[in-house]
Amino acid sequence: MSKVLSILIIPAVIIIGSLRYYLFYRYAINRHLNDENYRERTHNPAPIYILLGITILALLFSNSRNQLAINNLQNNILQLSNQIYQLDQKLLDISKKDLAVYSYGLDLISLEKQNGQYVATVRVNVYPELLHGKTEFTLKYNGESQVMKEENGVYYADISFPSVQGGGSAELIVSYGSIMQHDDIYLEGEKIMGSLLPSMNLTGSSEIRNKTFQTNWTIFAGNSETRKITDAVLIIDDGRIHKEFDLQEALTKGQMELSIKEKISSENNFIAEIQYHDDQGFTYTESVYSPTKPFHLEITDSEGIQVMVL
């Protein structure tokens, strides 16, 4: 409303001031022409009126600018309010879609031989990040369901399966009253072997160019709480050429740098593998490079029985 008044008042003041000034001079000129005794003088508006007029105009313009700034600020606040509302709606939609937001982890509790095969017992840990009141977690695997226990805000349950077959997947059921959320928990071997079994990992580059195998690797060795690596070698083989490189430095220092440049006869059958043993008789054979063969990790015991294949 103030903005409209400013727009109307400013032109009105200018028009009235101009008209009054015009009438004042016209009146003075007529008196000068009709009255011989009228003393000639310069008819200028008094400075106080000029100053007053300028001040009024300045105030009106200033008020108009301030009102415009206030309107802009109100528009910005309205836009921010709309954005916040839209964000709240998105969060509400997410919360309606999922009863719980969580992450999960897998721990290998035990690995035992039963009736000639190894059975892995794995603990599934669920770490809630967002719950809607009292929530129940149920783990369903191989046709059997169990309510997960809670300890210090973490929900957990143990399941067992033949390790050589891998665990596949389990179903996690999240219950909140009569509403349920169903999710899959994948029992990847890479996740379940880390806590109980040792491992060797590498970073860097490798390639075959002009029938030459080249690497620039850093190899890391890591023992578990119950098993320690006793020896390790890198094997390269293409069916005709077979070479082994000792990795003892990685075992004593925890890591080592390895650069190789070796001629090979063919890429079709080439594979580079790290092979190592632990102090309880397990043999680990892990492929680390091949142009044609997929990654694999095979673990066998001292009798040659497969423990795990990934």
Image: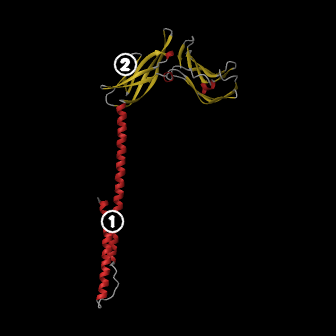
Q: Give the amino acid at mark 1.
A: Leu
Q: Is residue 141 left or right of residue 302?
A: left
Image coordinates of residue 259 in percent, x first then y, are 66, 29
Image vertical order of residue 4 relative to residue 85, above or below? below
Image coordinates of residue 96 in percent, x first then y, are 34, 32
Q: Is residue 16 visible?
A: yes
| Res 25 → quadrant | bottom left
The secondary structure type at the circle numbered 2 is strand
Crowd band around label 1 with a 10 angstrom C-alpha radius: few (<14), some (14–19), many (20+): some
Residue lying at the far bottom in this picture: please name it: 36
Real-space Cα separation, disc 2 to disc 1, in angstroms: 77 Å
Q: Residue at x 52, y 20 (%)?
A: 197
> Which residue position is annotated with label 1?
60
Residue lying at the far top in this picture: please name it: 115
Image coordinates of residue 64 in percent, x first then y, are 34, 62
Q: Residue at x 36, y 43 (%)?
A: 84
Closest to the observer: 300 or 196?
Answer: 300
> Which residue position is annotated with label 2?
146
Q: Residue at x 33, y 67 (%)?
A: 11
Crowd band around label 2 with a 10 angstrom C-alpha radius: few (<14), some (14–19), many (20+): some
The secondary structure type at the circle numbered 1 is helix
Image coordinates of residue 132 in percent, x first then y, are 33, 31
Residue 81 is marked as none
Image vertical order of residue 62 relative to residue 255, above or below? below
Closest to the observer: 97 or 123?
Answer: 97
Q: Is residue 258 visible?
A: no
Comes first in the chain, label 2 or label 1:
1
| Res 144 → quadrant | top left
Q: Residue at x 43, y 22 (%)?
A: 124
Q: Is residue 249 left or right of residue 95?
A: right
- Which of the two marks, 2 or 1, is nearer to us in this view? 1
Q: Give the amino acid at mark 2.
A: Gln
